[in-house]
Image (tube, rainbow, N blue to C red):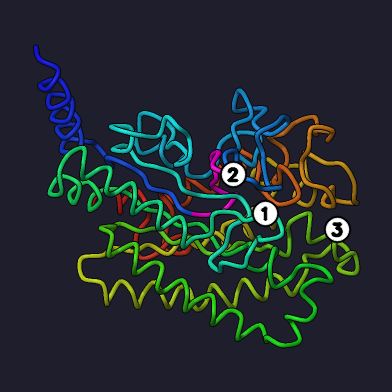
Amino acid sequence: MTAEIVPGILTVSILVGICFAKNIPASFVFGDSLVDVGNNNYIVSLSKANFLPNGIDFGMPTGRYTNGRTIVDIIGQELGLKDFTPPYLAPSTAGLVLLQGVNYASGGSGILNATGKFFGGPINLGAQMDNFANTRQDIISNIGAPAALKLSGTSLFSVTIGSNDFINNYLIPVLSVPEQKLISPEMFVDTMISRYRLQLTGLYNLGARKIVVVNVGPIGCIPYERDSNPSAGDNCVNLPNQLAQQFNTQLKSLVTELSTDLQGSQFAYADVYHIVQDILQNFISYGFENANSACCYVSGRHGGLIPCVPQSKVCGDRSKYVFWDPYHPSDASNVIIARRLLDGDSNDITPINIRQLAGL
């Protein structure tokens, strides 16, 4: 058998797999540290998670900002993907591997280019879109334009971003005071939505059709915000949650608008704010014992003042904590969130859930 024939046979077999895949052929992931699976390992950034105790329940630290799996890892497993979707910047993410999807997410990133800059420059959403455009060209080189178009049209795309535009931009203690005086919350949210509209439309123009857009969770309830705003007492911090809700209201309208305007698209609006709020309010019924503090902690009443680092202490039972560190959910929380996005009703994700979207 000649060397020229072998790649052709491999490509045909993969395309057959795509055509007869039970759920989705591939998952393409965009976002921030909630779904980063290691891209920040390869860039100059203060925001990294490639060290223990991160990944303690994953088997090893990989760059995931949690003790185990991310939400997209769990969704991929549930939808029958053979492997975890790999980080774009990993050298091994090349060739036929691309046909099963790529993760472009970057810890600290945002919708706006300025977000997270003090970390050393994460890969913002615009740059993630550029990286996907490069992947798309590589896929076309591998299997040809018609097959590449079919792949992107049947794959799952998800975008989980926006939290850092508030936490690491508009709400940075001290540094953001001048910005808040110049720019009202309404203006800031409007700017985010305008930019996001262009980015999501760009994703559609690159071939994405099944797109899950995840809203911003109740960021005023994370251990970092609780410890940064002690005057809130035992309550969540109001301003971050109000900003998230303002953004989410406009985002839901934007998703409806794009569904109408972009022919052949099928968007799903994932209401993670609602899901996480429900977990926090009813944490005992979900099997948790702690809904306010970080499992991986150094200092602060809620362990929220310092990120998870090698010197951190770790709680005795990680499955009993809603939060892994000052910012991110634990694997146990991610399982609940992922399953509700997969199979939830219109209170969790609308107009259809991810399993229904995958089956279209």
Q: Is residue 309 left or right of residue 101?
A: right
In this view, the residue in front, 59 or 11, is 11
- Sequence-wise, the earlier of marks 1 and 3 is 1
Up the image or down, 243 lies above or below 107; here it is: below
Instruction: Give the Cα distance between marks 3 and 2.
Output: 29 Å
- The residues colored magenta run 31-40
Kind of element beneath mark 3: helix
- Sequence-wise, the earlier of marks 3 and 2 is 2
Q: Is residue 2 left or right of residue 36?
A: left
Q: Is residue 35 magenta?
A: yes
- Residue occupying image coordinates x 44% and y 54%: 344
- Sequence-wise, the earlier of marks 2 and 1 is 2
The disc label shown at residue 43, or none: 2
Up the image or down, 27 lies above or below 20; here it is: below
Looking at the picture, which amino acid does disc 2 mark?
A: Ile
Up the image or down, 141 lies above or below 249; here it is: above
Report the residue that reaches farthest toward the top. 1
Question: Which residue carries the number 1 mark?
Answer: 120
Looking at the picture, which amino acid does disc 1 mark?
A: Gly
Instruction: Give the Cα distance between marks 1 and 3.
Output: 24 Å
